Image (cartoon, rainbow, N blue to C red):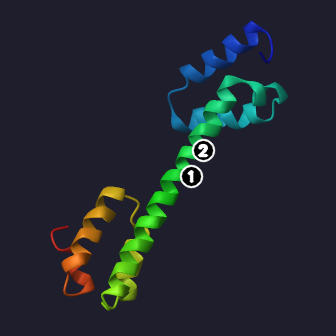
Amino acid sequence: MAGSSHEVFCTRFVDSCLTGRRAKQMWRDLMKTVQYFWRHPLAEQVREEGREEGREEGRIEGSRAMLLRLLEWRRIPAPDAVRERVEACVGLGRLGEWTKRAVHAANADGLFTGD
């Protein structure tokens, strides 16, 4: 185990006490500079959180691309305003709804009916 049990306890204690997202991020950024941190269980947690964020971003990007590709396959023009709205969307649920609508939409604006 990295460091003494006292170091491990203190590291975990401080991390668990920080409730603000910004304060927690500052703490973790600070801990990144501490050599033993990378062998610490908290480091694995931070890495896993980063991996999960990356996976989520990948799912969102894939959903956006699929939606725009579906419009293209159906030969439905997607004006810049529609593309911008799709690219700005960060909700997988909303992208899923728009993709369902794209299957039957007569035009790109049909994606957003009901929003």
Instruction: Looking at this view, name the residue that lies furthest to the right.
Output: 35
- Residue 4 in view of the camera: yes
The residue pinned by badge 2 equals 50
Residue 53 lies, in percent from the top left, at 53, 48
Q: In which quarter of the image is the N terminus?
A: top right
Residue 83 lies, in percent from the top left, at 40, 80
The residue pinned by badge 1 equals 54
**Label 1 neighbourhood size at 10 Å, few (<14), some (14-19), many (20+)?**
few
Location of residue 103 with respect to 45 vertically, above or below? below
Residue 112 lies, in percent from the top left, at 23, 74
Q: Do the residues labelled 1 and 2 touch (CB within 8 Å)?
A: yes
**Label 2 neighbourhood size at 10 Å, few (<14), some (14-19), many (20+)?**
few
Q: What residue type is labelled 2?
A: Gly
Quadrant assignment, res 89: bottom left
- Residue 27 in view of the camera: no
The circle on residue 31 is: none
- Please indicate whether residue 112 sits to the left or right of residue 1 in the image: left
Q: What residue type is labelled 1?
A: Gly
In the image, what residue occupies the spot 75% across and 35% down?
32
Q: Which of 73 and 80 is in front in this view?
A: 73
Q: Is disc 2 placed on a helix, strand or loop?
A: helix
Q: In which quarter of the image is the C terminus?
A: bottom left
In the image, what residue occupies the spot 60% across and 38% down?
48
Location of residue 42 with respect to 87 vertically, above or below? above
Quadrant assignment, res 75: bottom left
**Marks 1 and 2, how far apart in space?**
6 Å
Location of residue 56 with respect to 6 vertically, above or below? below
Q: Is disc 1 placed on a helix, strand or loop?
A: helix
In the image, what residue occupies the spot 37% across and 86% down?
72
Residue 17 lies, in percent from the top left, at 55, 20
